[in-house]
Amino acid sequence: MMARAMPVLLDGLAVTLELSALAIVLSLIWGVVLVLGRLSHLRPLRLACAGYLQLVRNTPVLVQMYFFYFGFAMAGLRLSGFTAGLLAMVLQNGGYMSEIYRAGIETVGARQREAGLALGMRPFEAFQIVIFPQAVRLVLPPMTNQFVAIVKDTALVSTLSVADMMFRARLLIDRTAAAFEIFADLTLMYLVLTAAVALLMRAAEWRLGAVD
Amino acid sequence: MPNVLFANLPFLLRGAIVTLELSAVCALLASAIGIVAALAQSYGNLVARGIALIYLYLMRGTPLLVMVFAAYYLLPYVGIDVDPTTGGALVVSLYFGAFMSEVFRAALASVPRGQWDAGRALGMHGRRLMGIVIVPQALRLAGPPFINTCIMLVKGTSLVSVIGLAELTLTGREVVERTLAPFQVFGGVALIYLVICYSLSLCGKALETRLPHA
């Protein structure tokens, strides 16, 4: 049974991977936009970004998914489950990413740059030699946690009828009643996926010189 | 338009109370599990450490939704017949217990070595050393991350709606089915979660500023 469930789950893996990758990339970008707003000189913009952050951080992503999926459908602008799920995940995780960036920026700070310049570095050199290695060391570990959280959150789109691994596993259980084997397979696949994300990020830390 | 929300607010608030009760029970259980797992991981023998590590790895690497459905589908097979409330509470507690254990483990690890030495120099061992010197300091350090994990837990309880536990999110879905006003109702549901979680984060802020540094 273990071997028979795998191919069906593997079909769902493509959806899970696609959604995870899109959500990670778009969250990274949305986080940059948010942190620029958060550190802007315009007070209203700063406040709006801070308010946004509290809103997404303090509400469940499942409720946000329902809000977009059922809300837009009722308003006549039907979003697919995939799109609604992706939208909710990007809005929420973009907020977390912006906080990770902010912590990195505020900790490394302008003085480090000035110190680099005072030592006769050009601005790009100061960034490359002084700022970047310190920022990477601060930012990558929490970012890894966030990526793992995103991969795990993709399972929620199964409640919007998106045929990811979780959804296919439930279909299989309803059809075959071999619940133990299917859950063993499913758990194993998520474990491998999250471990792979963590390992890749660890490799990135090494590569970027963030590990002593 | 917001009339739909106001008319159904009593239902949603009843759901919110279930969410609050569920969260409180789960936070207590998860803390207990977390402390045991953290102690097992930090000071246990080889077997205890192995079991703790497998548990932590399993919970942190799989989605909560998978665990919720696993409990729903698998427990009846092994002859454990639990209602959604008990099953949901158990799964959420076990899941966030793994995150709590990290909170406590990190807190224990950040009590400086010198504090252990100082305690031993004063002739303390085992339970007294832990109880008088180490744990009180660790608890102070654990405050803010503990609150963060509680916020994650409150949000996590929304997932047990899929197995039929009528907490805030499922109540919201039921109200939407009746009123066909998803924006207002889910917006209202989100606001209620916001109030709960934001209050928690204010408690966290207070903890951070009130507690003296270790």
Image (tube, coloured by chain):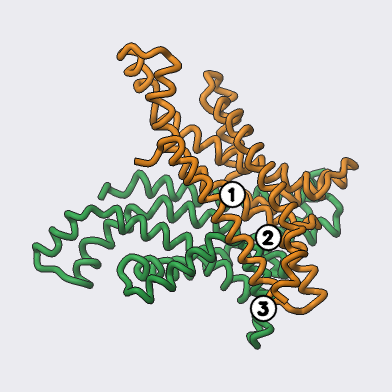
Chain colours: A orange, B green
Q: As shown in the figure, which amino acid type bears the numbered disc 3?
A: Leu
Residue B201: x, y in percent? 49, 48
Residue B120 horizontal/vertical position (percent) = 13, 64
Give the vertical position of B186 relative to A39 (above or below): below
- Give coordinates of residue B208: x percent, y percent: 37, 46
Labelled disc at residue A144: none
Residue A62: image x %, image y %?
69, 53
Relative height, residue A94 to residue B53 (above, below): above
Which numbered mark, 3 or 1, is in the foreground of this view?
Answer: 3
Estimate how packed mark 1 is, as few (under 14), some (14 to 19) or many (20 or more) residues with alpha carbons within 10 Å: some
Comes first in the chain, label 1 or label 2: 2
Give the alpha-carbon distance from disc 3 to disc 1, as whole Å: 35 Å
Q: Disc 2 sits on a residue from what chain?
A: B
> Is residue A200 shown above or below B121?
above
Identify the mark at residue B74; answer none if there is no mark.
3
Q: Earlier in the sequence, mark 3 or mark 1?
A: 3
Distance Cα–Cα, label 2 vs label 3: 25 Å
Query: What chain does mark 1 sit on?
Result: B
Residue, disc 1: B195
> Residue visible at 40% across and 12% down?
A122
- The numbered dot on residue B168 is 2
Quarter of the picture holding the N terminus of chain A:
bottom right
Residue type for callout 1: Val
CA separation in Å, label 1 and label 2: 13 Å
**In this rendering, position of residue A174 left or right of residue B46:** right
Check chain identity for marks 2 and 3: say if they share one. Answer: yes
What secondary structure is marked by label 2? helix
Residue type at mark 2? Leu
Q: Are the two marked residues, 3 and 1, in contact with CB atoms closer than 8 angstroms?
A: no
